Image: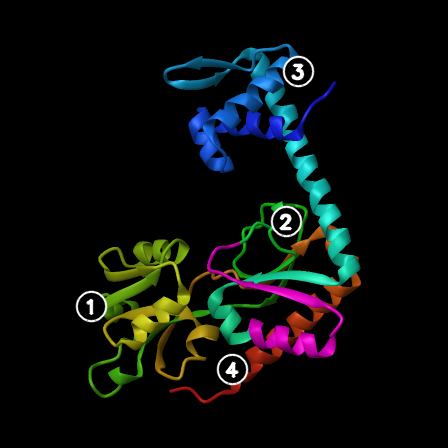
Amino acid sequence: MDWDLNDVRHFLAVARAGSASAAAKSLKVNQTTCTRRVTALEQAFGLSLFERSAEGYSLTPGGQALLEQAERIEVAATAMFASARELGRAARSEIRFSTSDVLADLVAGPAVAAFARLHPSVSVIFNADSRAVDLGRDEADVALRAHPVMDDPQLVVRKVMDTPWAFYCAASWVGARPMPTSPADVAAYPLATLEGRPAALLAAALPTANVRYVSNSMKALIEVIKGGECVAALPMMVGDAQADLVRCFAVDVDAGGLWIVFHERLRQAPHVRAFVDHLAAFVLRWRNEVQDRPRR
């Protein structure tokens, strides 16, 4: 049989999207290419995979029967290409590292710089982004994350520290207005928060809170607090490192901690092991230094 893995990829995209146009958009190809790929697969199989209608594409019984096998092909192909790329990176001693923008500024950037001095033969490709990359899909080799989602058994996770949270206000508040010292006090002030889990926790704890600002960026949230108009909760490792912020009071939340995450297939790669060990030790030293600094 003469078949093309791209045909399977287009079949899966259409099955998931329910239309050729939506599938083409997700694959970043034109709709004609998408329909041609699906038709080619149907011709190779001698089987109709979709019912076409004005409402879109729906799987035929034959298409439904093949869907699970196509998904297994996708997983196997992703793993094969990831392994091949890793073999190439290992030969070049290359590591793709990802973390958030604020962690990059606080600790990950200095950690990578120190690693480069100790291991000049290893190249580190550094990606600082608020978006959590998918290591299972080979978007990075190693990541430093707060409360990562542990839903992939092939990922190795290593907790490097707890991340307690507290509410912070701008240093300009001190002496100018009363500082909040409890959740009840906070409810009386304009609040800022990160979107997602922090915003949900805030809404559950303070349903009448006056939330003025919601951000997907920790760095942007810090700047809003420094502006002096809002109070917000931050990880202490972040808030305590800001010279222009004052810790108001700690909050009891399950923050999940800070973790190093990498794929199981990299466990035995010497350059990756060296990087992970270095990163963990560097973060712990940095945490101790932050905790020892005098706070306002």
Coloring applied to the structure: rainbow
Q: Nearer the viewer, mark 4 or mark 1?
A: 4
Query: What residue would you read off at disc 1?
Result: 188
| Residue span colored magenta | 108-132
Judge whether residue 15 can be spotted in this image.
no
Dots 1, 3 in contact, CB < 8 A: no
| Precedes in sequence: disc 1 or disc 3 | 3
Quadrant of res 277: bottom right
Q: CA distance from mark 2 to mark 4?
A: 33 Å
Which disc number belongs to residue 44? 3
Q: Nearer the viewer, mark 1 or mark 3?
A: 3
Circle 4: residue type:
Val
Q: Secondary structure at mark 1?
A: loop
Circle 3: residue type:
Ala
Q: Is residue 209 above or below residue 150?
A: below
- Residue 231, magenta (yes or no): no
Circle 2: residue type:
Asp
Circle 1: residue type:
Ala
Q: CA distance from mark 4 to mark 1?
A: 30 Å
Dots 4, 1 in contact, CB < 8 A: no
Q: Could you tell me which residue is drawn at 46 percent across and 59 percent down?
A: 130
Q: CA distance from mark 4 to mark 3?
A: 63 Å
Q: CA distance from mark 1 to mark 2?
A: 46 Å
In depth, the one of 107 and 32 nearer the eye is 32
